[in-house]
Image (spheres, rainbow, N blue to C red):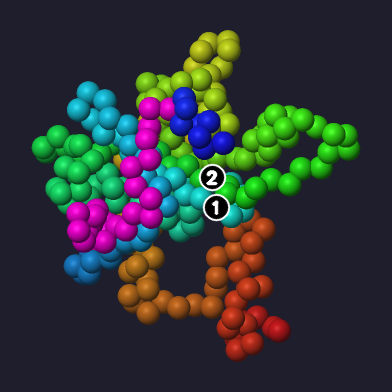
């Protein structure tokens, strides 16, 4: 499936398991500052980084392999959820490491441009078939079960570089409407949209970090959607918030 994806893509994998630690030419961690001057830094290991170079610009796409399904919603940021991949994307695009920027082909004084993030389920689908099916039919059915979600630029030229057919199975459900030829899909965002996402990330991280530094440690876990964190909490036997 991934080989098929790259057969129609100008993006190329440049890094696997890339450490954002600022060492040995690696990108430096992303740093936020609290009002009291405290620095909050985010590093980590990025599963895969894809690059596309055009007209002196370097476009970055971050890929995360998931063992289960992933329904990415940009509104989750407001709750402090689903921030990791976006933090990685901005770590690469806002890195202060000139050595890293030079190594990926950025011109002097320029920085990588965000093309998006994609979550790819690494689960091998299990298929049931009542009748014998030939190999191609099985592979086609399995491919339809593989899902990519995330957020991507609305720049059509860059999306075509990701997939020359604009195949929505490879670019997070984005497609071209037949009536007016416009791009559609909830994964789309503009260059300005990426700036707004960064500002939102910064606001949420500064808020949470300030609370943490102030000693806020309420037994009041976030309940969002169907997830109830209390069910999995190891401190449940001694919790004064809930009845066991």
Q: Quick check: is 219 in the magenta stretch?
A: no
> Is disc 1 surrounded by few (<14), some (14 to 19) or many (20+) residues within 10 Å?
few
Q: Residue at x 22, y 23 (%)?
A: 55
Placement of 76 over or under 184, stated as above or below: below
Where does the image place residue 223, in percent across and percent down from the top left? 60, 63
Q: Residue at x 54, y 45 (%)?
A: 120
Question: Relative to 1, is 89 on the left or the right?
Answer: left
Q: Which mark is residue 120?
A: 2
Secondary element under disc 1, as helix, strand or loop, is strand
In which quadrant is the N terminus drawn? top right
Q: Residue at x 49, y 17 (%)?
A: 182
Question: Relative to 117, is 145 on the left or the right?
Answer: right
Q: Earlier in the sequence, mark 2 or mark 1?
A: 1
**In the image, which residues are magenta?**
9-34
Q: Residue furthest top?
A: 179
In which quadrant is the C terminus drawn? bottom right
Q: Quadrant of residue 148?
A: top right
Q: Residue furthest left?
A: 108
Where does the image place residue 201, in percent across and percent down from the top left? 37, 52
Where does the image place residue 86, in percent across and percent down from the top left? 39, 49
The Cα–Cα distance between marks 2 and 1, rounded to whole angstroms, is 6 Å
Q: Which mark is residue 66?
A: 1
Q: Are marks 2 and 1 in contact (CB under 8 Å)?
A: yes
Q: Which mark is residue 203?
A: none
Placement of 235 over or under 198, stated as above or below: below
Q: Residue furthest bottom?
A: 238
Q: Is residue 18 visible?
A: yes
């Amino acid at each position: 499936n991934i080989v098929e994806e790259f057969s129609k893509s100008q993006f190329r994998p440049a890094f696997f398991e890339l450490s954002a630690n600022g060492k040995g030419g690696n990108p430096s961690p992303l740093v936020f500052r609290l009002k009291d001057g405290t620095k909050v830094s985010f590093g980590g290991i990025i599963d895969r980084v894809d690059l596309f170079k055009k007209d002196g610009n370097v476009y970055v796409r971050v890929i995360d392999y998931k063992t289960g399904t992933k329904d990415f919603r940009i509104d989750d940021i407001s709750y402090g959820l689903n921030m990791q991949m976006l933090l990685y994307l901005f770590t690469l695009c806002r890195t202060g490491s000139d050595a890293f920027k030079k190594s990926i082909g950025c011109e002097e004084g320029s920085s990588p441009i965000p093309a998006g993030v994609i979550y790819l389920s690494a689960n091998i689908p299990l298929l049931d078939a009542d009748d014998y099916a030939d190999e191609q039919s099985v592979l086609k059915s399995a491919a339809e079960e593989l899902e990519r979600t995330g957020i991507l630029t609305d720049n059509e030229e860059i999306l075509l570089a990701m997939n020359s057919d604009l195949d929505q199975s490879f670019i997070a459900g984005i497609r071209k409407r037949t009536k007016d030829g416009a791009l559609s899909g909830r994964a789309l965002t503009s260059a300005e949209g990426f700036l707004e996402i960064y500002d939102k990330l910064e606001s949420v991280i500064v808020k949470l970090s300030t609370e943490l530094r102030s000693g806020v440690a309420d037994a009041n876990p976030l309940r969002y959607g169907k997830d109830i964190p209390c069910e999995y909490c190891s401190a449940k036997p001694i919790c004064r918030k809930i009845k066991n």
